[in-house]
Image: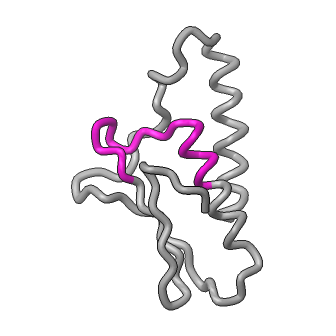
Amino acid sequence: MAQHHEIELRVEQGIARFTLNKPATHNALTLDMLRALDEGLAQLEGLAEIRRIVIGSASGRFFCSGADIKEWGDIDPAQMGSRFIRAGNRVFRRIR
């Protein structure tokens, strides 16, 4: 997986663990984080030794607060929302 400072991927004994670690925003997902998840999942596809994928949080208090809408900036909300929807759907389809 391409290194991403807010997502860690570890593989041990057939279990791939993604850990979200962006405590300042309660792990609000950015497009970069979605891309990193997508790339990591793509690398795991077809590996017979992977029996489970776990997505968790480095925090004991929260998992993920949703999309990080602050990164949307001046972009039209509908356009940015559709980008997030496409990226998110791609990730969730891979997980499925």
Most distant residue in the right direction:
46
Look at 70% across and 27% down and name the residue there.
82
The answer to which quarter of the image holds residue 24 is top left
Look at 63% across and 25% down and name the residue there.
81
Look at 63% across and 46% down and name the residue there.
35
Residues rendered magenta in the picture: 21-37
Look at 52% across and 36% down and name the residue there.
30
The structure's colour scheme is one colour
Give residue 85's position: percent from left, percent from top: 67, 36
Give residue 47's position: percent from left, percent from top: 71, 82
The answer to which quarter of the image holds residue 26 is top left
Q: Is residue 5 left or right of residue 59?
A: right
Q: Is residue 60 left or right of residue 54?
A: left
Give residue 3's position: percent from left, percent from top: 53, 56
> Compared to 84, does 63 lie above or below?
below
Q: Nearer the viewer, residue 44 or 93?
A: 44
Give residue 16's position: percent from left, percent from top: 53, 76
Q: Look at the image and say whether residue 23 sits in the magenta stretch.
A: yes
> Compared to 22, does 7 lie above or below?
below
The C terminus - image quarter: bottom right
Most distant residue in the front direction:
3
Q: Look at the image and say whether residue 33 sits in the magenta stretch.
A: yes
